[in-house]
Image (tube, coloured by chain):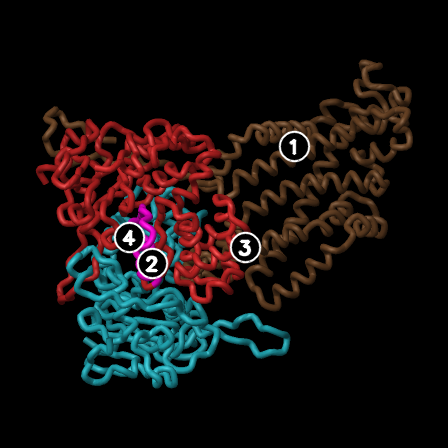
Chain colours: A brown, B cyan, C red
């Protein structure tokens, strides 16, 4: 912005220039959100996800039907009865009610299991990456042990031993999926701890705890966030797998369970399997697109200096 | 005024363990800083010059207790700071602050500028919050930043401005000694001049003592009162400004000075270019004799056999070279 | 006067950013004759590297484009050539070395393979001959035990040695022009001296023109005969190195030369503050405006400087400066 003095004398010296207007403070996450917004696929996927979550929360009360109630003839195909748009399953239960109800379970377990995973993984990865030495060695061997476990079998064992309640399923899924987060966290910590602002914090008197959780971890978040988003998707899939095998709380409906209980009738009434399958597919797809979008938005190489 | 120097480094050695070859072979060490001694007088600037691998940055980090020293003493105001812990270490940190080289990685990207400057005040002093705010605002103005920029994040500043934030942070606790590690190397030349002038002005205003690390001889010549030249972990020459630049004694110092490309045409034609061939030898192999011998244009047998000690040849002029005697003439 | 080897006229390169397009190179014209050494000087973001990339046809895909002007090389109009034709010129007639030798060399191939690759891409010789030529080249860039070093990987070499390998690759096909983009900025000053020495000697032997891109005035004085000072995508001053350093006509050039603490021949007790150029370089958003882009930092600015882009003022010896007040300062 330049100051135009009142005189139009071209050779008059200009001594004062107005300062540039100061921009507003923008947190790095705001910059990332801007980049994310530009990604149309990710934005649409996010909107769909939000709709799914809203449906999961208010859907059952809005729709008003009990998913366990047998309401009509079994295997009514979708469209045949306008009251039950998606048809009925092998017991004559309203498929739409079941799918809406299942959304709630899938999403809750997905989020909760991802949370457990991230909590364990970040803690282990952060301590290993920060302290190095024998702490890192011990924690990494521990991580490798869990990494090579056959995840499905192990969670089946847990559920079989301790019962198939929602918290137990969440725990079973969480406990086998944390290793990726741990490795990513450790890698980020190894990278960031060498950066000068960490040394600067030490020179400013910060102690270990503050360095780990106040300085390094906030800057390590981007890849952890991306991984967490993707883990919600894989937790949902995992849960679908477990409930497909019948290892689920019988008092709740979940998508995998719908598929599992109807699977023997797949050839006769495929819609009972494919419809919940589509629900899973759309949800996972949207989560993946959002995860990709987050990755691009948070990737430092794409951010200008 | 006391004649005792503010900082006195004695026989400082910093080593790093290299990866072992086998499970049972002894660990090899890289001696990044090897038996280095120097002192800095209050209110003055000592520059440490060297190329990559010389150990200058490591020596500075060790003096600031940011890297663990293996042996030696670092005496600040009469007290050895190397064994300090806890509260005493905190007090030492208040007196010795650091300005880092890379403006792009020395500021936490998720902290606002004023938070970055305020950090040392919060962690190292008991200053009440209101006073902290006041100090922060004052420092901002002193380093040439505008008050409206206090709430911005590092990525919203230019390189030079970020370095100013770094300087403000270093001055927050009113330190006595400020260690500047290549503070202008990553900046454009016009901004370099601004920052150097700022550092000089601040030194005068606050009576600061600088330990100035650099590889740029022009900058060093401008900023320092005395200079120490390091090569492969050892000091090869240490003199006051005039003595070193007008009469460099060690062959490495002379080569370094002659290697700097100069705008001054007469200077270029007058000084013969001393080219030292090759690269520094492998620092992990233990050296016998003078470390510069393998590249020195005037090396003799005794240079390869025994390591020359750092001796005071003339008042305030120490050299580590067998070929320099009391007559203080360069062997080149 | 013989035809120039490289003639750039009214070159304009636009960069697409989030906020629109900006002319990162804004109406730049210059000539390079065979065997001549030219240097581009300026601070970061002034467009000196972009000019080199534009000549090489290596502008970032989809982001940078040549929108006006011509680049005439050896009788060919480079802006109109297809990618395939440009590829044949790159590395062959015009080659380039970059600032960071570690990232310019592929870490997973031996240096021998990388030299041979360039030779085989542009010349029809056998593999065995290419390997022999590679050894000769390594020798020419003064790497001892050249034959054995061919099998080394980049990580086994020091920074100075890697840069020599880059030079060897760049000179493999005996190009007419070598563009060196800040070749020694990442190297120690003693290694820098070796590299400059090498480049000067190689130029004597091969007659290659060198375009040196740098921010270091001292390097320019050592290496080049003519120089171009760039600021915000425009040429601020152009002319012979001795003329410009002796009598800089543009306020920016003056500032650039005097704000650097040079190593003095004789040191006295006095210490003066450095002459400052206040402010910072303009951001990309400011490029292209019809005014002098240096005006906000210039103590000699007048109203004219803020309302119209300066025209070139010519001086003796083919020196010219783009400043409304060049003649009177």
Asked if residue C208 lies in the magenta stretch, the reply is yes
The span picked out in magenta is C191-216
Which picture quadrant has residue A247? top right
Q: Is residue B280 visible?
A: yes
Q: Which residue is mark 1?
A: A286
Foreground mark, 2 or 3, reads: 3
- Residue at (47% x, 56% y) in the render: C134
Mark number displayed over residue C198: 2
Which quadrant is the N terminus of chain A positioned in?
Answer: top left
Mark number displayed over residue C128: 3
**Which of the pair C74/C287 is nearer the observer?**
C74
Asked if residue C194 lies in the magenta stretch, the reply is yes
Task: Classify mark 3: helix, strand or loop.
Answer: helix
Which quadrant is the C terminus of chain A positioned in?
Answer: top left
Q: Are marks 4 and 1 on the same chain?
A: no
Parent chain of label 3: C
Query: Is the residue under label 3 in contact with that under label 1 (CB below 8 Å)?
Result: no
Q: Are marks 2 and 3 on the same chain?
A: yes
Mark number displayed over residue B139: 4
Foreground mark, 2 or 1, reads: 2
Q: Position of residue C251 (x, y in %)?
A: 17, 42
Task: Classify mark 2: helix, strand or loop.
Answer: helix
Q: Are marks 2 and 1 on the same chain?
A: no
**Which of the pair B192/B64 is nearer the observer?**
B192
Query: Is the residue under label 1 in contact with that under label 4 (CB below 8 Å)?
Result: no
- Residue at (76% x, 49% y) in the render: A172
């Amino acid at each position: 912005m330049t100051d135009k003095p009142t005189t139009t004398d071209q050779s008059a010296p200009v001594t004062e220039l107005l300062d540039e207007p100061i921009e507003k403070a923008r947190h790095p996450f705001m910059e990332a959100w801007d980049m994310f917004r530009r990604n149309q696929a990710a934005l649409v996927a996010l909107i769909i996800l939000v709709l799914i979550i809203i449906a999961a929360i208010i859907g059952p009360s809005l729709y008003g039907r009990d998913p366990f109630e047998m309401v009509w003839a079994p295997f009514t195909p979708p469209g045949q009865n306008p009251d039950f748009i998606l048809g009925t399953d092998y017991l004559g239960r309203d498929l739409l009610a079941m799918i809406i109800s299942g959304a709630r379970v899938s999403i809750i377990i997905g989020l909760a299991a991802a949370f457990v995973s991230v909590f364990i993984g970040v803690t282990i990865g952060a301590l290993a990456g920060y302290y190095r030495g024998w702490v890192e060695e011990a924690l990494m061997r521990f991580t490798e042990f869990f990494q090579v476990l056959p995840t499905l079998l192990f969670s089946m064992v847990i559920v079989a031993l301790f019962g198939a309640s929602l918290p137990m399923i969440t725990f079973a899924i969480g406990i086998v999926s944390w290793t990726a987060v741990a490795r990513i966290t450790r890698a980020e910590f190894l990278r960031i701890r060498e950066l000068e602002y960490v040394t600067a914090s030490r020179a400013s008197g910060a102690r270990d705890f503050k360095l780990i959780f106040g300085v390094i971890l906030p800057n390590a978040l981007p890849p952890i966030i991306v991984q967490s988003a993707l883990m919600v998707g894989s937790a949902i899939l995992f849960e679908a797998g477990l409930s497909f095998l019948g290892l689920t709380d019988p008092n709740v409906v979940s998508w995998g369970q719908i598929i599992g209980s109807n699977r023997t009738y797949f050839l006769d009434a495929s819609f009972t399997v494919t419809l919940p399958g589509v629900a899973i597919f759309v949800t996972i797809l949207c989560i993946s697109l959002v995860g990709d979008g987050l990755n691009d938005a948070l990737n430092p190489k794409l951010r200008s200096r | 005024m006391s004649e005792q120097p503010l900082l006195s480094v004695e026989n400082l050695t910093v080593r790093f363990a290299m990866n072992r070859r086998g499970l049972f072979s002894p660990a090899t060490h890289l001696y990044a800083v090897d038996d280095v001694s120097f002192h800095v007088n209050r209110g003055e600037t000592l520059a440490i010059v060297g190329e990559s691998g010389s150990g200058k940055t490591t020596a500075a980090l060790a003096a600031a207790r940011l890297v663990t020293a293996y042996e030696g003493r670092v005496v600040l105001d009469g007290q050895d700071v190397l064994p300090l812990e806890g509260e005493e270490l905190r007090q030492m940190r208040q007196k010795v602050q650091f300005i880092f080289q890379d403006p792009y990685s020395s500021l936490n990207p998720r902290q606002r500028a004023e938070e970055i400057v305020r950090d040392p005040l919060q962690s190292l002093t008991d200053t009440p919050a209101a006073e902290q705010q006041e100090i922060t605002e004052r420092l901002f103005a002193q380093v040439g930043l505008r008050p409206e920029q206090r709430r911005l994040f590092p990525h919203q500043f230019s390189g030079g401005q970020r370095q100013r934030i770094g300087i403000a942070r270093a001055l927050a606790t009113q330190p006595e000694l400020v260690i500047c590690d290549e503070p202008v190397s990553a900046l454009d030349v016009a901004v370099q001049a601004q920052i150097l002038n700022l550092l000089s002005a601040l030194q005068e205003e606050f009576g600061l003592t600088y330990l100035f690390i650099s590889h740029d001889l022009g900058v060093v010549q401008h900023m320092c009162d005395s200079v120490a030249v390091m090569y492969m972990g050892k000091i090869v020459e240490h003199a006051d400004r005039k003595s070193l630049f007008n009469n460099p004694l060690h062959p490495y110092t002379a080569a370094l000075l002659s290697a700097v490309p100069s705008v001054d045409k007469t200077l270029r034609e007058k000084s013969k270019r001393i080219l030292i061939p090759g690269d520094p030898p492998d620092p992990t192999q233990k050296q016998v004799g003078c470390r510069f011998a393998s590249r020195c244009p005037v090396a003799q047998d005794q240079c390869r056999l025994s390591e020359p000690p750092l001796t005071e040849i003339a008042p305030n002029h120490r050299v580590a070279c067998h070929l320099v005697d009391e007559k203080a003439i360069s062997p080149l | 006067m013989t035809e120039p080897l490289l003639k750039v006229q009214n070159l304009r390169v636009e960069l697409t950013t989030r906020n629109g397009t900006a002319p990162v190179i804004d109406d730049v014209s210059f000539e390079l004759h065979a065997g001549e050494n030219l240097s581009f000087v300026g601070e970061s973001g002034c467009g000196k590297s972009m000019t080199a990339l534009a000549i090489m046809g290596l502008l970032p895909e989809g982001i940078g484009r040549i929108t006006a002007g011509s680049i005439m090389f050896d009788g060919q109009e480079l802006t109109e050539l297809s990618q395939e034709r440009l590829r044949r010129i790159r590395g062959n007639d015009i080659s380039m070395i970059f600032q960071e030798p570690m990232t310019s060399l592929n870490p997973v191939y031996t240096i021998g393979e990388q030299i041979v690759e360039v030779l085989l891409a542009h010349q029809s010789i056998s593999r065995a001959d290419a390997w022999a030529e590679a050894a000769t080249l390594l020798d020419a860039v003064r790497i001892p035990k050249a034959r054995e070093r061919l099998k080394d990987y980049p990580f086994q070499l020091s920074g100075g040695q890697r840069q020599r390998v880059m030079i060897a690759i760049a000179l493999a096909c005996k190009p007419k022009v070598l563009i060196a983009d800040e070749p020694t900025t990442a190297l120690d000053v003693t290694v820098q001296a070796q590299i400059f020495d090498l480049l000067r000697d190689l130029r004597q032997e091969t007659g290659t023109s060198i375009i040196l891109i740098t921010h270091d005035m001292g390097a320019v004085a050592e290496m080049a005969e003519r120089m171009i000072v760039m600021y915000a995508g425009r040429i601020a001053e152009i002319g012979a190195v001795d003329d410009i350093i002796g009598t800089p006509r543009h306020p920016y050039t003056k500032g650039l030369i005097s704000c650097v603490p040079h190593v003095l021949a004789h040191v006295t007790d006095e210490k003066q503050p450095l002459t400052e150029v206040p402010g910072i370089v303009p951001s990309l958003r400011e490029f292209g405006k019809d005014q002098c882009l240096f005006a906000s930092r210039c103590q000699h600015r007048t109203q004219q400087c803020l309302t119209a882009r300066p025209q070139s003022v010519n001086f003796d010896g083919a020196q010219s400066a783009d400043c409304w007040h060049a003649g009177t300062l």
